[in-house]
Image (tube, rainbow, N blue to C red):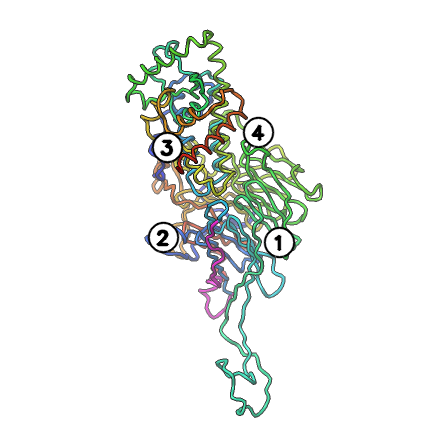
Amino acid sequence: MSQKPVGGPPGEEEVDWCLYQLNGTTEFEVSEADIISTVEFNHTGELLATGDKGGRVVIFQREPESKNEPHSQGEYNVYSTFQSHEPEFDYLKSLEIEEKINKIKWLPQQNAAHSLLSTNDKTIKLWKVTERDKRPEGYNLKDEEGKLKDLSTVTSLQVPVLKPMDLMVEVSPRRIFANGHTYHINSISVNSDCETYMSADDLRINLWHLAITDRSFNIVDIKPANMEDLTEVITASEFHPNHCNLFVYSSSKGSLRLCDMRASALCDKHSKLFEEPEDPSNRSFFSEIISSVSDVKFSHSGRFMLTRDYLTVKVWDLNMETKPIETYQVHDYLRSKLCSLYENDCIFDKFECAWNGSDSVIMTGAYNNFFRMFDRNTKRDVTLEASRESSKPRAILKPRRVCVGGKRRKDDISVDSLDFTKKILHTAWHPAENIIAIAATNNLYIFQDKVNSEMH
Amino acid sequence: MFARGIKRKCFDGEEDIEGTLAGFKSVPSYNLQRQSLLDMSLVKLQLCHMLVEPNLCRSVLIANTVRQIQEEMTQDGTWQVINAQNTGQASLDRLVSSDILCRSTKEQGEGKLVPSYSSFSKDFEDIQSQDIISDLSTVASVQAPRNPQSNVWEMENPQENRGNFQKSLDQIFETLENKNPNSVEDLFSDVDNSYYDLDTVLTGMMSNTKMGHCDVLESFSSQTTTNSNSNCKSDINELDHIVEILVES
């Protein structure tokens, strides 16, 4: 297993990742509400949104390059912070509805404003983010502070003029899509038609029109007539990036179903079922649990799908349903620890996965604040760490290694010393450049390709 | 290290239970580990009841694991009624445990011994084993005459046990789904807190012992016990209703 960093486009120099910036409080002051629960770049990579357990959304904007300040180029600064969801109480069921933001998805930009969808367990909201950098001055009837003028002082008419002002970012809720889900929403995905989007909970998937909040169409329903017969739930879903009629959803049994909305109104019958037969030599009581898919992502090209289950990431070719074309081991050393991980519930952790812009490298998080990258072309992989101790600004990240007994090198970490409370569940890759955002509990790390940052 | 979980130990590292099932079946600790896993899973499911809104995916995965263990134990033949006379030495290791037992006593009706499954729990061995075994023997010997063909009895039981067990799983899912204003009480009435009280659990297997609402259910239930699921379900609903009334008064 090579230790050289990966991430560069095929044929070019390999990528050296370095810490670009770190946002978040120090370790001593972590409150549950600050824990980041989702990270998402917009379609150009100019904006980066994070959601947390307290229901807040923070949007970062990348500073445009300028020759005057070479060091602050490409820095992501806080653009806007707002409270997206509040805790609610469902009186009918006597249950609290958490305000934690499960997912954020950006809409493709159609005018000067930016729009995003944010969701908690039950309600999806459409937010519009607008800038105001001018204001009218010179009213006839009002003075500078807005007070009505004494009419006797008005001697002539004037046309109000727009004058520049300090930039103000305004965020307003444009639509609230409520009461569509009985179970907990785990995914939302905007369709390539830019008019509809889908939301998936444990048992159902609904199709919404972005402009209509009082109605949604149920397109998948796997709820059995008898809840006692329930053995499988929906874990993630996504629209195809190019074909607006196709979407995929994953299940807790490790299967993927590609559905075509043209086939029927209720897409209970999949068009394609992607499932890898179980390896009989590896079978255990935990086989099903570790096969449960926690995330599914289409490649940018639309040709492949990336799935994450507990121990591996897999690349699937849409044209081959029988097995994945590539399988990468994320942390196979945990295979012998499954019982303990079941006991402490870590086995149910849902890790996300991401493609880079050219679909040549895939990334996913792990424990001990480690995250892993796999280069599909060179077949090299690397383990990096997102922590304050090992990340000095602009210093190149050193690859980490987990040793499983046998020869132990300096700086290796043994499996038993891994901190399972430090998990990297949410990661995102800039759509075009080698910039990645890693959420480690309450901290947001942004790493960049050293070459990238030096060039600017 | 690992994040703190429940206190029960797990047998990682030493014996690898993730090996081929067939190959390891002969290893005694495999059964222990399997039992431990089963107990742990049941506790997890029980805890699900107490959470505000359980994670459905997690619950389903745990329930599937439980079913898988149960099926294997049924195939193994380890899913048996306790029969102290037949098992002899092995009975020292066997104790009936878990709240499932409590539910099964509801269905006893005439006092037919229907424990859900037996456990090879080493933990309990040292504690009160003597008292319990003698009680077990007493009960078992009382039951034996009712069923002269002990082979048939043993074969029957996996099905009954399955049924009882399945009912408990069903109940958990029912409760998960039927969250209505009364549900909070229902949730707690379903959860048998005596599971956590070892004494109560062990004494509860004797049909004459008072066991809180299980006993109440027995005395109020006028229906004779059958093995049909629907009867038991209506029993449970009726019984829950009765318990509610009792609690309110």
Residue under pointer 1: A214
In which quadrant will I find the C terminus of chain B? top left
Q: Callout 2: 10 Å neighbours few (<14), some, many (20+)?
A: some
Q: Amino acid at mark 2?
A: Val
The answer to whether marks 2 and 1 mark residues whose Cβ atoms lie closer than 8 Å is: no
What residue type is disc 1 on? Asp
In the displayed image of the protein, which residue is found farthest to the right? A263
In percent of width and height, residue A38 lies at 49, 51
Which region is colored magenta?
A64-89
Q: Which residue is mark 4?
A: A277
Q: Residues within 10 Å of mark 4 (few under 14, many from 20)?
A: few
Q: Secondary structure at mark 3?
A: helix
Which is more toward the observer, A74 or B165?
Answer: B165
* Residue A68 x %, y %: 47, 70
Please identify, in this view, whether the residue under mark 2 or under mark 4 is nearer the observer. 2
Using the image as rendered, state which of residue A85 and residue B9 is in the foreground: A85
Question: What residue does disc 3 label?
Answer: B193
